[in-house]
Image (cartoon, rainbow, N blue to C red):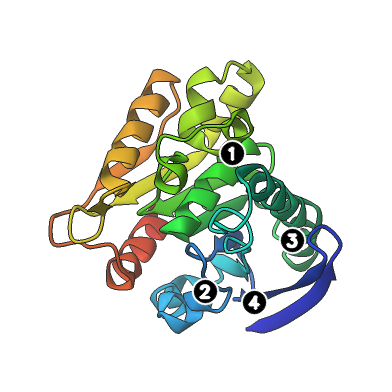
Amino acid sequence: MEYRKWRSPALGQDMELKVYGHGGKPVLVFPSGGGRFYDYEDFGMIGACGPFLDAGRIQLFAVDGVDQQSWMNASISVGDRVRRHEQYVRYITDEALPFIWDWNRSGQGILTTGVSGGAYHAANFLFRRPDVFDAAIALSGLYSPKFLFGDYWEDSLYFHFPLTYLPGLGDEHVLDLLRRAKIVLCVGQGAWERCGEYDCIGETAAMKGVLEAKGIPAWVDFWGHDVDHGWGSWRRQMPYFLNYLV
């Protein structure tokens, strides 16, 4: 494991990350909503991925998030939340990605992953930038602005949530890249996967419909009613899907 921190020009603050493994396919790990870069380790996900790390099949890059400053920050306007998120996008694309490419010399494309709120980021970055990312494992995600804003809408939200922009995506080059990507969307059907506006089951099903309509192959997997929205479930799911993708 290696720890790194630098002052982000895009965000105007220090940003931290951890690197795990000695080689293999680079995996960009987003924290869960409001979470931190060290949560993946603290909640046992590094251990769950241990055989893949030890065998040199993957190298994990666990980045920090700013959800509490952007999407989850109810003290600022929706427009300001969007702008802060766009600064985070620049941090990932202009700073974190060059760091990953410099550190990992495998020449392989980058897989994105995350759980809960991190699943949103994992999917969103892949769908927005399939020229950079070629695979995603999104576990228990939400993919529309409804869980944050209910029925409230501003046009600035459109390009930041897969369930809003994917139905209208018509760029054949982008669609071709997405059709080549390896995409996994998984959700359990147990406790907390559906709770008020937080309907991970419904939004995963909606994503399945949109992807099928666009001809984008994806493995959309609904696990059982004993599989809840929690780290215990995600520790089982992540190595299961890695075994097929890497």
Q: So how many labels did they put on this image?
A: 4
Q: Is residue 51 above or below residue 42?
A: above
Q: Please name the residue that numbered disc 1 is placed on.
A: 160
Q: Please name the residue that numbered disc 3 is placed on.
A: 96
Task: Determine which of the numbered discs, if any, sits on residue 18 in the image.
Answer: 4
Three-letter code, disc 4? Lys
Res 13 quadrant in image: bottom right
Disc 1 vs disc 3: which is toward the camera?
Answer: 1
Asked whether residue 188 is in view, the answer is: yes
Point 24% across, 60% down: residue? 192
Which mark sits nearer the N-terminus, 2 or 1? 2
Which mark sits nearer the N-terminus, 1 or 3? 3
In percent of width and height, residue 207 lies at 38, 34
Disc 4 vs disc 1: which is toward the camera?
Answer: 1
Task: Determine which of the numbered discs, if any, sits on residue 73 in the image.
Answer: none
Q: CA distance from mark 4 to mark 2?
A: 14 Å
From the viewer's perspective, is 143 left or right of 86?
left
Task: Determine which of the numbered discs, if any, sits on residue 53 in the image.
Answer: 2
